[in-house]
Structure formats: structure tokens, C-alpha cells
Image: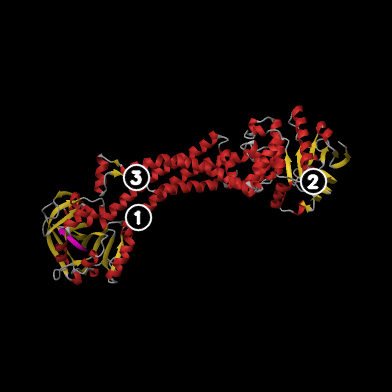
Amino acid sequence: MSIIKAEGIYKTYNETHVPVNALNGVDLQIEQGEFTAIVGPSGSGKTTLLNIIGGLDLPSKGNIFIEQTNLKDLSSKQLIDFRLHHIGFVFQAYNLIPVLTAKENTEFIMVLQKRPKKEREEKVKELLEAVGIGDKANHRPGQLSGGQQQRVAVARALASQPKYIIADEPTANLDSKSTHELLDLMADMNKKYQTTFIFATHDQRVMDKARRIVTLDDGKITSDETFDR
Amino acid sequence: MLAAIAWRNVWRNRRRTLIAAASVFTAMVLSLFMLSMKQGSLYQMIAAGVNQVGNLQIHDTGYWENKSLDRAFFEHGQFNPVFKSIPEITRVVPHLQTFSLASYGKQTKGIVISGIDPRLEDQQSGLSRKIIDGHYLSGRDEVLIGELMATYLKMNVGDSIVLLGQGYRGITAYGIYKVAGIFNLPSREMNSNLLYMGLKDAQDFVYPYEKGLLTGYSIYLKDGTQEMPIKKQLEKQLGKKYEIISWRTILSDMLQTISVGKISNQVFVLILYLIAAFGIFSTVLMMTIEKRKEYAIMIALGMQRGRLVWVSVVETIIVSIVGVLAALTVMVPLLTYMHFHPVQVSGEMAKIYVLYNLEPIMPFLASPELFLSQAAIILGLSFFSAVYPILYILKFNVLNAYRH
């Protein structure tokens, strides 16, 4: 069953005098449990597509369904609430809240979801152990390496028990060792929690791990391949 | 957790927060010092004014509007039971006031005659201390005149002054009195136009046929805050024949002058607080601009803008509260000390104070209302300073903020 269904997605930016067509009719379906990479050259529309799938932006034309919900039908507040309960995010620059510890950053989403304290504490412990930084739970982001911060970001994304996780260039700021560790971690989480991962990436190492690679060029899908890995 | 985020955000840039708090601290310290000193002086002035005229005055109804001797009344002991029934009344000073011509040699002028009980008047207003030549009233057929009146009439102590005017019920009032003393009061008008004589002499002057004529009583209270209930009680007990006038009506000119002074104080305080507000605002502005990306991430993750507004407002309030608490920590003990140990005024300035019937001290007010009102103003300004981040958070484009 498709959890994400993009139908005829167009996105035009009118921020300058010349309109820029970032997406030109994208149709895409993503199933539960996929580990998908969206690839393509700079300016091909990867991040725009990811933003639309992630409910951060809306298409100029076309529809985006998350299961039965058309994101275009949601108000701004409903969209924020939808992201809180259904979508996880891993950003290129980690983007942890600098004044919170690793534990608090992971717990943050669950606080917003108003989940009980006991449940939050158990979940945080489980996730931080799972991403391998249980011993650094009380460290703030500034006291962690890039790889460790990104692990916390993955834990934070998983904490909301989302239907899928959007990861925009998650390895761009990591060294080779951290990249491999992070990809292994996300692949494990994908298997363990059956969480769908969708990456936008240039990184060949991410593509080598992905079981499906969607290639974009000039705002259109030019190839869509699946791999048995 | 949101409160923790706000608290920790404030201390992310400790130096900047302390600078903003310092601007609040400075503005509040200066304004508290100034307001405490000014309000202390105003209360001193009001207390001196009330000391002069009483908390309340009783007249025949209509006298306050038309100060004619025809509105005088006779006192035949009917007031004493009323006064005795109200324990809050500490002193009652009777008076009889009228207008007359005063003449000496070839000089004549229109004057105000104030008939007083010399002992009570001196206890209340210290009139004997204002005598600059001669002595205070000590017997019958004596008067005190102002310094400027003495100059105009070319009179000295021991001279006889002729008074001629209209008495009660249309009779002609006349008499010759010896000038026992010359006084100097702060008011030029009083020095020029006022003549004091003993109450009995004044009563004989305006109406010798019946004892006890008065134009009013000054009522002094133990506790000035009880003025309104006692006014009502007196009105109820004395009926409509008499009017009860508050010192606020009698000293309305002084209160008006005070309120003009208060406005100029408020303008000064406003300027101080605007400086503090800009201190807070600039800090809040920098914090908002710095955290644009963080705000965007939080909203992307699923935090409603309203909750983010709450965090931002709490941050602003924390910055202000740090400044307010620091200022209160310094100023509450300092002003309380100065309230109980006022600065003593000496030299020529002290003489002026005494002349105006004021104690030669510089009093400071240290009331909870003063401290709380200033703290409330600062916190109000904090909310005002938080308007920019609130509007920003409610309107900003998440993707643009994230990209930049």
C-alpha cells in the first residue's frame, strides 16, 4: 500500500522576476518500509520534492496524498500537526536545538505530542541506545561530533513514531566513517521499525544502500529503479 | 521543557542578556529614586496643606460657593456631641472669616479678617513661629498683620489699626485694634491681605449681639484615609444645613499644581523607560534574528507557532525580570532606609522649609505601590518589546528561514 502518492506535481517559484519551475509534473508513489533515494544534479528539484512530500511546502499544481490525506486540504496549523504526528526529519546540518541535551532533543517531539513522561523516558532511552549514544544522553549538541549529532537527529526523527522520515543530504557534513555508521544505523532502523526513509542525496554511498533510486532532472523523474539489497 | 528552552536561550549569550538587564536596572533605579524623592516631597506638601486647613471643613451650606458672612452660623454647643461621637476626630478648630477695610493714617486697604482660637491655631499651624516682629496674640483687642500689609499701611507693632466693614445681618462692623505682631507667611497674598484676631474679638466685631458666630470648623483626623467615611458620617449627623468639604476641594489649586508636577515626572520616567524598552527590544530583536533557523526547524518538526510565541515572550520577560529584580534588590532597602532616615536640609534652604510650614527634611516615599507599579510598567514594556518577535513568528516563511 502506498503511504505517499504524488500526482502531477508542479512547483513554480515566483520569488524573482523570472518564474522558476522547480518541478514539472512529478508522479511518484512510495510504499511502507521503502528505503528510497531521490538523486539528481543540483537544481533538479530533489529538495523541492522532499519539502512537498514532507509537508513543508505545497505544490503549485497537483496533489500530494499521505495515505488518504491530501496535504493541500490542510490548513497551516493542521499541516504542522500532521508533520508532528506523521513525518520525521533528518537535516543536512543536524539542526538539533542547541540548548537541549541529546536526551531532551530526542524527547522534544514527544513533548509536543503530549505523550506521558514515563513513556517518553522509556522511548528516549531505547532510541539513544539504538543509535549508539546512550552514554552521551546528557551532552548538548556542541559537545557531540557531527556523526553523533546526526545520530541524535535520527533518534529524534524516530521518536515521533512517524510514517516516514525525510532526510535531506543527511551525510553531506559527515566523514566517511560516520557516513557508513549512519547509513547502517538508518538501514537497521528501517528494518527494525519498518519506518520508510526517503533521502535526497548526491552521495554515492547513500545510493549504494538505497533499495530504490528515483532520479530527477529539470524537475522531472527521468528514472526510477529498484534494487534487491 | 518549553520553559527550559526559554531560560537556556536567554543565557546563551550571557553578556548580551546582562547588558539588556543593565539598561532595565539603570532605568528602574533612576526612576524609583526620582519618584520616591518627588512623591515624598509631594506627600510632605500635602501633609503641610492638610495641617493648615484640616482634613475636612464644616460650613453652613453654600458658604464654599459664596463666602459671605450671611452664610455664617451660630455655635451653641450643638456640634460637640457629634464631634465626641466620632473617635477618629483628633482636633476641631473653629474659625470666623470676613472681609473689611483696614486703615492707618492716610492709608486704607481691603483685607481678610481671620478670627481664630489663638491656642488651637498655634498648636495646629505653628502661627506663633511666623511672627517676625512683636508677639503672638495674648489678649483681647489685639491683631496680627502680614509683613506686606504693615509696609503698605506704614504700621509698626503697637500701632492701632482701624477696621470698618459689613457685619452679620447687614450691621456695620467697626473697631480699633492694637497690632501685637507682624507675621511672614509663604504666600505673598496672605502677607498682604490677611489679618488674624482672636475668635471672640472677631465675633464681637461682626455681630456683638449674640455669641458663637462661626464661618466654619476645621476637622483633623487620626487617619487621613478615613476622610470619606467620616465625611459621610458627619453629613448624616449634621443634616443638610451644613456642608462638609474635603481638603481636596479646599486645596484644589495645590493639587492641580502637584498633578502638573507629576506629569513632568512621568515624562522623565517615560524617557528612562523608553531607553530600557529599546535595550530589551534590541536584545529581543537580535535573539529573534539569530534564531530564525531554529524557529524554522521547530515549526518544521511540528511545533505550533503559538507555542513558539510563548517561548519567545517568556524569554523577553526573563530578561526584564533579571533587571527588575536587581533594581528592587538595591532600591527597596535603600529607599526604605531613606524613608525612615530622610536627608536633613540645613542652612537657608532649611529656613525656607520652615517658612512653608514644612519639616526641613527631604522625605523619600518607600511604598509597595511605588515598587510594584514600576515593576509592572517594565513588564508591560517587555510585552511591548515582544511584539516584534510575536509578529515575526506568526508570519515568517519556514522554508525561507531554513534556507538562509
**Residue A12: which numbered mark, if any?**
2
Q: Is residue B99 magenta?
A: yes
- Give the magenta-colored segment's residue range: B96-103
How busy is the neighbourhood of tag 2: few (under 14 within 10 Å), some, or many (20 plus)?
some
Q: Is residue A181 magenta?
A: no
Mark in the foreground, 1 or 2: 2
For the stretch drawn in magenta, what is the main secondary structure?
A: strand
In this rendering, the answer to whether A177 lies above or below B337 is above
Q: Element at badge 2?
A: strand
Mark 1 sits on what residue?
B255
**Chain holding disc 3:** B
Report the residue at 57% width, 38% height from top: B8
Mark 3 sits on what residue?
B364
Say left or right for A179 vs B173: right
Residue under disc 1 on the same chain as residue under disc 2: no
* Amino acid type, callout 3: Phe
* Amino acid type, callout 2: Thr
Say left or right for A165 vs B217: right
